[in-house]
Image: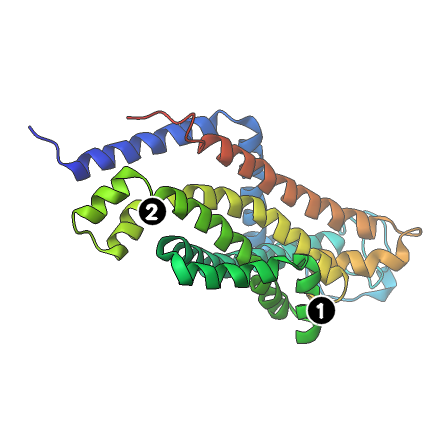
């Protein structure tokens, strides 16, 4: 029985998926990162059931040591540090994820449009990208966030305004490489529309490296959002956000270093987990090592 081109393509994709999953399953560090991320997500979901009120103030118990009621002690206002760390997962992860989604929704289409259309469209888009890349992204985000005022929504807008250019340039480079390949030229010669070429032939080649980049950027975004909150531009009191917790504990560094130690460890652990997973995905999706069907 003759196998159609679509069936052959689907078989190739399934074979590649199996190969990627097999490589990822064999990477202990990637699995460790994935396990940490899933654990943090589960903690965020179960926060109302496993933690106390993170904003309840009890000055009579301020700076209390570890105990059965407060496993990590309390902060300068008598609030449970562990509960604030747990509820902080509901702030840091969703904010970073939403910011990354907005960045990708802006950067990927612009990058595809620039690389596929070329000519004047490409020149105009790349000049805008060059202007934005001329400034350090973090400094530019600080300026925008400062102009908009404190708040997580403003931080999201500030980061998305400057971070999308990296995705646009990255995607453009991939599209320029892919659109010159024979299968794209054959699709164009057969009368396939531009939209069909982009969705069927170019976008699948773009997604794999973008997924790796996005996984690595999740850790960066969590770190940057926490840094902006530490500076007072992100989450505002009494929100239990890790960067804001670092800022709250700064005056008590010598007397109660745990106020900064625990949120710092939380940030470091989650950032490390995303970096480990991103490295594992990069190795698993490496086309030079992928089994071809």
Image location of residue 50, percent across then percent down: 62, 52
- Quadrant for the N terminus, please: top left
Image location of residue 198, percent across then percent down: 31, 52
User: Which residue is label 1 attached to?
Assistant: 236
User: Which residue is label 2 attached to?
Assistant: 202
Of all residues shown, which one is farthest toward the front?
119
Label 1 environment density (alpha carbons within 10 Å; few <14, some 14–19, many ≥20): some
Helix, strand or loop at disc 1? loop
Is 84 drawn above or below residue 157 in the view shown? above
Q: Between 250 and 144, which is closer to the camera in this rendering?
A: 144
Of all residues shown, which one is farthest toward the right?
255
Image location of residue 146, percent across then percent down: 71, 71
Helix, strand or loop at disc 2? helix
- Whether pointer 2 and pointer 1 mark residues with C-beta atoms closer than 8 Å, the reply is no
- Quadrant for the C terminus, please: top left
Can residue 185 be seen from the camera position used here? yes
Image location of residue 87, percent across then percent down: 64, 57
Q: What residue do we see at 55% from left, 53% from top?
A: 166
Q: What residue do we see at 50% from left, 42% from top?
A: 212
Is 276 drawn above or below residue 215 in the view shown? above
Q: What residue do we see at 63% from left, 49% from top?
A: 220
Is 138 drawn above or below residue 14 in the view shown? below
Can residue 48 be seen from the camera position used here? no
Q: Which one is earlier in the sequence, the residue at label 2 or at label 1?
A: 2
For residue 250, the mark is none
Would residue 178 appear left or right of 46 to someone viewing this image? left
Q: What residue do we see at 71% from left, 69% from top?
A: 236
């Amino acid at each position: 029985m003759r196998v159609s081109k679509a069936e052959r393509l689907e078989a190739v994709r399934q074979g590649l998926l199996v190969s990627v999953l097999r490589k990822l399953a064999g990477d202990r560090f990637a699995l460790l990162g994935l396990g940490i991320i899933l654990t943090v997500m589960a903690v965020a979901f179960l926060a109302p059931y496993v933690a106390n009120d993170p904003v309840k103030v009890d000055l009579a118990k301020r700076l209390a040591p570890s105990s059965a009621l407060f496993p990590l002690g309390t902060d300068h206002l008598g609030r449970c540090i562990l509960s604030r760390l747990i509820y902080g997962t509901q702030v840091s992860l969703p904010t970073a994820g939403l910011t990354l989604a907005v960045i990708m929704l802006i950067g990927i289409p612009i990058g595809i449009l620039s690389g596929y259309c070329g000519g004047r469209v490409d020149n105009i888009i790349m000049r805008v990208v060059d202007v934005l890349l001329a400034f350090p992204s973090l400094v530019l985000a600080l300026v925008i966030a400062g102009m908009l005022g404190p708040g997580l929504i403003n931080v999201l807008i500030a980061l998305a305004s400057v971070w999308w250019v990296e995705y646009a340039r990255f995607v453009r480079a991939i599209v320029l490489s892919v659109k010159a390949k024979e299968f794209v030229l054959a699709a164009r010669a057969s009368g396939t529309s531009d939209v069909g070429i982009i969705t069927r032939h170019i976008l699948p080649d773009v997604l794999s490296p973008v997924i790796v980049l996005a996984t690595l950027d999740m850790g960066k975004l969590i770190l940057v959002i926490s840094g902006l909150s530490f500076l007072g531009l992100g989450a505002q009191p009494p929100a239990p956000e890790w960067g804001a917790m670092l800022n709250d504990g700064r005056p008590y560094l010598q007397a109660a270093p745990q106020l900064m130690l625990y949120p710092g460890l939380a940030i470091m652990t989650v950032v490390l987990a995303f970096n480990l997973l991103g490295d594992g995905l990069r190795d698993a999706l490496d086309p030079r090592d992928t089994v071809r069907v």
